[in-house]
Image: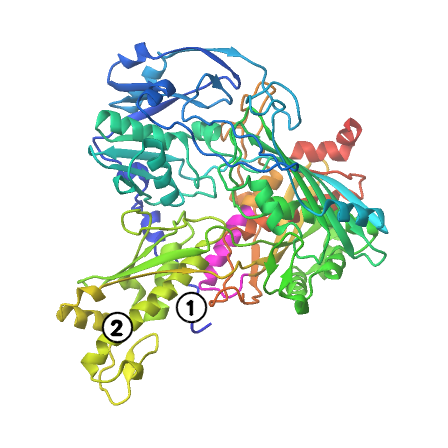
Amino acid sequence: MEKFGKSQPIKRVEDVRFLTGAGRYVDDIAPKEALHAFVFRSSVAHGLITELDVSDAATADGVHLVFTCADMEAAGVNIAIGGAILKNRDGSDGASPLRPMLAKGKVRFVGEPVAMVVADTYEQARDAAELIMFEVDELPAAMAMARGGETLHEESVDNCAFDWGMGDEQATEAAFKSAAKTVELEVGDNRIIVNSIEPRGCFAEWDGTRLHLANNGQGVWVHKGNLVKAFGLDESAVRVTNPDTGGAFGMKAMAYPEHFLVSHAARALGKPVRWMSERTEAMLSDNGGRDLVSVAELAFDENNKITAYRVRTKCNLGAYNSQFGQPIQTTLFSRVLMGVYDVQTTWLQVEGYYTNTVQVDAYRGAGRPEAIYVLERVMDRAARELGVDPWELRRINFIKPDQFPYATATGETYDVGDFNKVLTRGASQADAAGFAARRKADAAKGLLRGQGVCYYIESILGDPSEGAKVNFLEDGTVEILVGTQSGGQGHETVYATFLSDQTGIPPENIRVIQGDSDLIAKGGGTGGSRSVTTQNNATLATVDKLVDAFTAFLSEEMGVPASEISFDDDRFRAEGSNLTPTMLEVADMARDKGRDDLMTHHERATLPARSFPNGVHVCEVVIDPETGIVTTDRYTVVDDFGNLINPLLAEGQVHGGVVQGIGQALQERVVYDEDGQLLTASFMDYAMPRAMDVPYISFTSEPVPSTANIMGMKGCGEAGTVGALAAVSNAVQDALWDHGVRQADMPFTPHKVWELLQGEAIAAE
């Protein structure tokens, strides 16, 4: 990969400052004189607010301001936080309830913001909040993903937010009726808490004419637009910045009440105001992930070829609508519903339900795990019921290389792929042939070994356009300003390296600037594995622009036509001229000539199509039947990410994603009681994966370069989690199958697995 990246495993340059405590996170950069905010939250899941008196809190020591929703409305704030509206199957709009920045008249989940207290110190603000008189006439909590129950919103009398469908329902039904064999499986996908290392936080400043919000998000422009709308400000009067961000995982992509609350407080007081979440507070108020149940069906012909796929899903939205363009479950299912299989007939129906829980709007590890998890679980079940080797069943149904570009039944067009090649490499790397011997050896020790396979595909989502600005500075360094936002992925290393590869500028001379709406006018932020592909595509466009500008300048300096000057990614050259300047040398020459117009170059570019990373995950687990403990013993990943800029960082992304998937599969689960109280609100109760829970993860790249971008890239940021859930789950199911267990759902905690082996869970059904 000579032209578009040297594909070298370069270590992350930003790690030095992160590991030595020199990172600059939002809590580090808040103004020293900033006041501290505390959010008073509901301790009740559902009820009518009968009393909300903040007068005593307002007179407490150190307190500068206490305000409620009514106060914000009186100040002219548009209190509505946006939410997506879906079309129902009958063509009507789904529910669109108001989500206020602070509870208005009613509370709908434990942890919902009710008031904000601003004081000199955090302790003073927290103590003052204890003086707020807050009474609620409690209503029953609606916790079931089903129609009926106590109504959360008048707009949805049965708590069904939407009933959405896509595909050809009639053709799919006909295919199932004529099928030689059908397979059905109910698949549960447990809710998880994102738990980024750095909890959410922000601070706001108001100078009388201009608002500045700094938060640890995944981009700045969405937040800027939200603030403009909420406060009725001109776009020029709002600046949003992101400093270093310690993990985001989709959860920090959207608006949260605190962004508006601290902004309102700063405007009301004329002083900077800061807020930082505590861990339990985060668990109560961060948008969660997953939480859906699907019934998946496959129809087969007599040759074990899939003829139709049908999924009916119920998903938990929490108390309010998703903020994405579509609720995440429908978006992800519709875009990769068919996976890597050649299927022409499909039907998907998704029903979204409101419950008295925190909003479900994000996904840790992100990507398409919901859709792939369901498909690969039912594929595993089909292999067992059809008596077919699970590897072979996938090969039979793969889209073949000569079928690309391939139009899926859900409207996507896959550009390239060689799934069988990747699967075969995965079997080799995982030593699939040696599995039987390993299983036999474990059986002799009284242990159960299982092998699980998952073949995933995902699409690169988000805005396909991005911008890049390159500034040449007097000290010989270069800035590249980008529209994405790093949350720990290594963007600074990747972007500097890529720009260096295209320009010959030493990477140590390049500084990456991100997360400032004043410095770059537009950007798509980070999410959906879009960052490196879209951002480097924009960098190529900017480099082309600056090469043209520098060539025109050199034409005069070298005395030759611009058409005779070439740039070889290192130096400019022309036949008959002794001048062979580098980029930095041309910048110095232009500066000496007073050509300040050549010191900045900016361009935007749009990807013509999506790219589709894919790969195979192979997991082997060992179960101790005496205790139910599941140990992930072997884990192999072979991925097609297209061309790689930095294999080391790609492998790191895969490792992190796989660990997140293992965490959900074996340990993590959000639990609420019947009254909507969160029972897993600390790390004493919510289990996160640790180093001892993870085996060595083998990673191999088997690239099929994408044709959807000139670089041949495919995203990799989310791929680890997308494949891990099904690979681990299928391995556990494989280990338990011969012991009569036919239904095994995440998380596979020791107690659950032990009960399954004892037959208690089966009997309970």
Q: Is residue 730 among the parts visible in the rendering? A: no
Q: Quadrant of residue 738?
A: top right
Residue 464 vs 545, above or below: the answer is: above
Q: Which residues are magenta?
A: 641-659
Compute the Cα span from label 2 to label 1. 22 Å
Please state, as top left, top right, bottom left or bottom right, where the C terminus lies in the image.
top right
Asked if the magenta segment contains residue 645, the reply would be yes
**Dot 1: what SS?**
loop
Per the picture, the main secondary structure of the magenta-coloured stretch is: helix
Residue 665 vs 270, above or below: the answer is: below
Q: Which residue is mark 2?
A: 550
Where is residue 473 drawn, in percent x and y?
A: 20, 61
Q: Which residue is mark 1?
A: 5
Where is residue 207 drawn, in percent x and y?
A: 20, 34
- Of residues 224 and 525, the one drawn nearer to the viewer in this rendering: 224
- Of residues 540 and 728, the one drawn nearer to the viewer in this rendering: 540
- Left or right placement of residue 707 versus residue 243 in this view: right
**Dot 2: what SS?**
helix
